[in-house]
Image: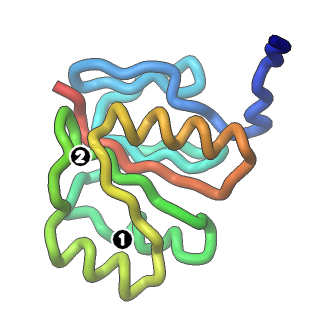
Amino acid sequence: MRLSEIDFGAAQPIEGYGPDFFRIGGVTHTAPVLVLPGEVTSWGGYDDAEPLCALAGRVDVLFIGTGQEIAHIPADLRAQLEAAGVGVEIMDSAAACRTYNVLLSEARRVAIALLPVG
């Protein structure tokens, strides 16, 4: 079997996570956080729809990590994202991190909004 190192280019994968933190690009960020290729910023959680809606046309899919367990996002947030044309996938934060990294390694246009784990 041949192994090769993944080149993420300017994008920053999720390297680790734990209670109230995510490690991205070698830097620890307190949660919640919004990660785009080349950009990491704090996120205000479900009440902060504006930066998520602004992703329309910039990404093919937005992953929302709902914390320790998968949960529905508020209906008004989902409606705002759909109205803006942002494709969204809901997962627990651990699964969202893994999926984001896989698609990022394929040079896909993805973003992730994460709530704390545990």
Residue position for label 1: 50
Give the residue at x 62% y 45%: 103
Name the image quarter holding the N terminus.
top right
Q: Are marks 1 and 2 in contact (CB under 8 Å)?
A: no
| Among numbered discs 1 and 2, the one appearing first in the sequence | 1
Q: Position of residue 29 (x, y in %)?
A: 39, 28
Tell me if residue 61 comes above or below residue 5 in the rendering: below
Local packing at callout 1 (Cα closer than 10 Å; few below 14, some 14-19, many 20+) is some
> In front: mark 1 or mark 2?
2
Give the residue at x 76% y 25%: 6
User: In screen coordinates, is 59 left or right of 52?
Assistant: right
Q: Position of residue 96 (x, y in %)?
A: 40, 41
- Which of the 4 image quarters holds residue 8? top right
Q: Position of residue 15 (x, y in %)?
A: 51, 21
Tell me if residue 6 comes above or below residue 99 in the rendering: above
User: In screen coordinates, is 61 left or right of 96?
Assistant: right
Q: Name the foreground residue: 79 vs 29.
A: 79
Q: Tag 1: residue type?
A: Glu
In the rendering, which numbered label is found on residue 13? none
Q: Position of residue 17 (x, y in %)?
A: 36, 22
Tell me the SS state at disc 2: loop
User: In screen coordinates, is 43 left or right of 28?
Assistant: left
Give the residue at x 20% y 45%: 70
- Which of the 4 image quarters holds residue 117? top left
Q: Residue furthest bottom?
A: 83
Residue position for label 2: 66
Q: Tag 2: residue type?
A: Thr
Q: Name the foreground residue: 74 vs 51.
A: 74
Give the residue at x 23% y 53%: 45
Local packing at callout 2 (Cα closer than 10 Å; few below 14, some 14-19, many 20+) is many
Tell me if residue 118 comes above or below residue 86 in the rendering: above
Q: Name the foreground residue: 25 vs 118.
A: 118
